[in-house]
Amino acid sequence: MAARSALAILAALSLAIGGCASQEQPATQPSPGGSATSGTTIKEGLKIAFLPKQVNNPYFDTSDNKGGKPAVEEFKGAYSQTGPSEASPSAQVSYINTLSQQGTDVIVVSANDKDAICGALTEARQAGAKVVTYDSDTNPTCRDLFINQASAEGIAASQIKLISDAVGPDGGEIAILSATANATNQNAWIEMMKTELGKPEYAKLKLVTTVYGDDDDQKSFQEAQGLLASYPNLKGIISPTTVGVAAAARYLSGSEYKGKVQLTGLGTPNQMRAYVKDDTVKSFALWNPADLGYLAAYAGAALASGLITGKEGETFTAGKLGEYTVGKDGTVLLGDPFVFDKGNIDTFDF
């Protein structure tokens, strides 16, 4: 899929958040690039279950309930969300087993660990379920498709540019506040950030450490506090996780470091609005999580309906988002990250 312009992303964001499922399109999806031939429309009555890293997380509430659910309603399936209250690799296994036993047609899962849930997912697939990962992938052998919110390269490039712009031309020490140590997406982005920091334009930035808040608000807050205690010359923090960046912003906004230590990351407008407006954070980035869940639901339905098999080159239509192509290793790319700042943040509500 061709990359969207910033204007197109803005339109998609506003549309998805403001109206969710108001622009239903026929679920007719030819697949000229693949071998699936069992039908041309999505089956009605498919049971689509979303299994996020953790429930009651604002990011996944948006991706699942404001994105996945409207999509499932459009093609007349049965939507559900289930999962652990803490982002633990082992905690997702029992939920996968239960969904498989319930005869779920599609399990849409964001993995807390790329290998820990593979056994359960393999058994679910053998029992007839299609498995779509989103946000954070498993080993490719454990699922049918991965819906990637943005490329690791794109996320890394945006994060390093944002912290560089915020810190200024003199550079200095920076740190990363991540989610869990085993999170597939986080680790991929961090490795790419390290590569990005090797470019000449970022020579004055020095990554001193990476710490982990486990996508827990209080632990992330404490880790942010600990960074400043351990590195008194720290100039910036990157937190590529919605829980971590909001917790770090809360700490900085009430500390002596406000305005002295810069912060960026991946967050939602509703979480970060107050911190952008009080100048704790200059800018941050994210894709539209509602679109991510919406795309994952349609991809899963296309699989379960026999319209695609997950092979590279196959195409399918994801409702109002249009046509997507399956890439290498069964990956479907949503698009590029979008930057939020004081000038545009009030335009969005999620």
Image (tube, rainbow, N blue to C red):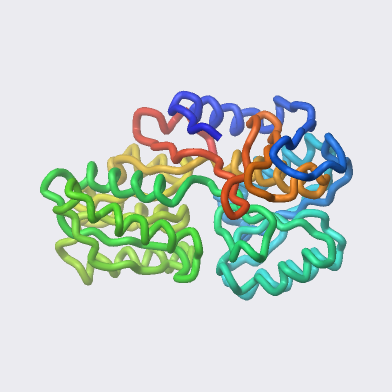
Residue in view at x 34 percent, y 37 percent: 277
Residue in view at x 60 percent, y 49 percent: 147
The foreground one among 216 and 26 is: 26
Can residue 53 be seen from the camera position used here? no
Task: Pick the quarter of the image with the C terminus.
Answer: top right
Residue in view at x 56 percent, y 69 percent: 113
Q: How many marks?
A: 0
Can residue 322 be seen from the camera position used here? yes
Residue 106: where, in percent of width, then height? 77, 54
Describe residue 317's horizontal placement relative to residue 210 as left or right. right
Q: Quadrant of residue 222?
A: bottom left
Describe residue 7's horizontal placement relative to residue 262 as left or right. right
Q: Quadrant of residue 248?
A: bottom left
The foreground one among 319 and 340 is: 319
Describe residue 223's horizontal placement relative to residue 96 as left or right. left
Residue 185: where, in percent of width, then height? 49, 59
**Furthest-left residue in view?**
170
Task: Pick the quarter of the image with the N terminus.
Answer: top right
Residue 175 vs 169, above or below: the answer is: below
Residue in view at x 66 percent, y 58 percent: 109
The foreground one among 69 and 305 is: 305
Residue 330: where, in percent of width, then height? 62, 52
Q: Quadrant of residue 176?
A: bottom left
Residue 11: where, in percent of width, then height? 53, 25
Residue 165 vs 215, above or below: the answer is: above
Describe residue 341's horizontal placement relative to residue 183 as left or right. left
